[in-house]
Image (cartoon, rainbow, N blue to C red):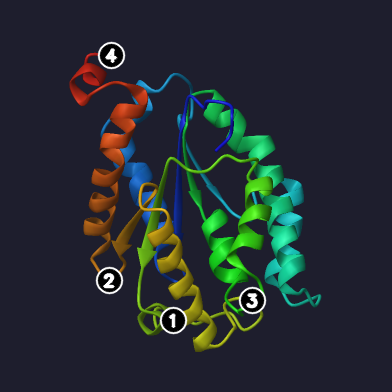
Amino acid sequence: MSEEKMVGFFVSVEGGEATGKTTLQQGLYRRLEEEGWGDYLPSEEQISRLHEPGGTRLAERLRELLLTKEFEIDEVEAVLMFNAARSSLMRSLIIPLLREGKIVILDRFVDSTLAYQCGKGTLSFDDVERVNQFGARRLYPDLTLLIDLPVEVALARRQMNPWDRYESRDLAYHRKVRENFHRIAQNNPQRIVMLDGQRPVGQMVEEAYLALLPRLRVHFQMDKASRAKGG
């Protein structure tokens, strides 16, 4: 964790391809708005939705290089590039937003880099985690929502892009990515809540919100009644 105490609250949404991460991010955002968390927090645009890699000019350029097959990139190079994009996003947006007391909901973060880049078995968890810590500027989420879905079900949801470096990899690779996410969840039980991606969207959003709510209350030291009264 960062040595600096952040006033805001940091949520990441993780999972493999076509598991519903963006849908969950959007649904959780709306749920927080409905419950008045946007009114409670002390600035405009109190709840921010971001994605990785991306969010800054540098990160978006790196995203193009990482996800397309224009250049051959090995797993070591990919880890470094993902973390360069991450470091840019952290410095430019996430850390300033958290300093201002906002809620940040991020689509993918360090766990995706760990699960995907260790998917071929050529890199160790320890090595990738050390680089991730540096790229994340030692600031990890207060809560990670991990959507779990059998690979066959996920990949049947949509046509995978043959030009995407990661989507186009074979079934065995995506199964290994899912196994890696399970390992990460087992290693981080206090931070990660696993959600069943086969449940209806509304139910999954509600489960995510109920996992998030007590942590928000503790973090902001307020309960729903006091928020409703504005104090």
Q: CA distance from mark 1 to mark 2?
A: 13 Å
For label 3, the crowd category at 10 Å Cα-Cα, with few meaning under 14, some 14 to 19 and many 20 or more, is some
Amino acid type, callout 4: Gly
Q: Which residue is mark 2?
A: 198
Q: Which residue is mark 3?
A: 164
Give the answer, above or below, for where 149 lies relative to 171.
above
Which secondary structure, mark 1? Answer: helix
Q: Which residue is mark 1?
A: 155
Residue 93's spot in the image, x, y percent? 63, 36
Amino acid type, callout 3: Asp
Q: Are marks 1 and 2 in contact (CB under 8 Å)?
A: no
Which secondary structure, mark 4? Answer: loop
Q: CA distance from mark 1 to mark 3?
A: 14 Å
Residue 99 quadrant: top right
Q: Which numbered disc flags the more N-terminal residue, 4 or 1?
A: 1
Amino acid type, callout 1: Leu
Residue 230 bears which disc, if any? 4
Which secondary structure, mark 3? Answer: loop
Residue 26 bears which disc, if any? none
In front: 88, or 44? Answer: 88
Q: Which numbered disc flags the more N-terminal residue, 3 or 2?
A: 3
Residue 156's spot in the image, x, y percent? 40, 83
Amino acid type, callout 2: Gln
Q: CA distance from mark 4 to mark 3?
A: 47 Å
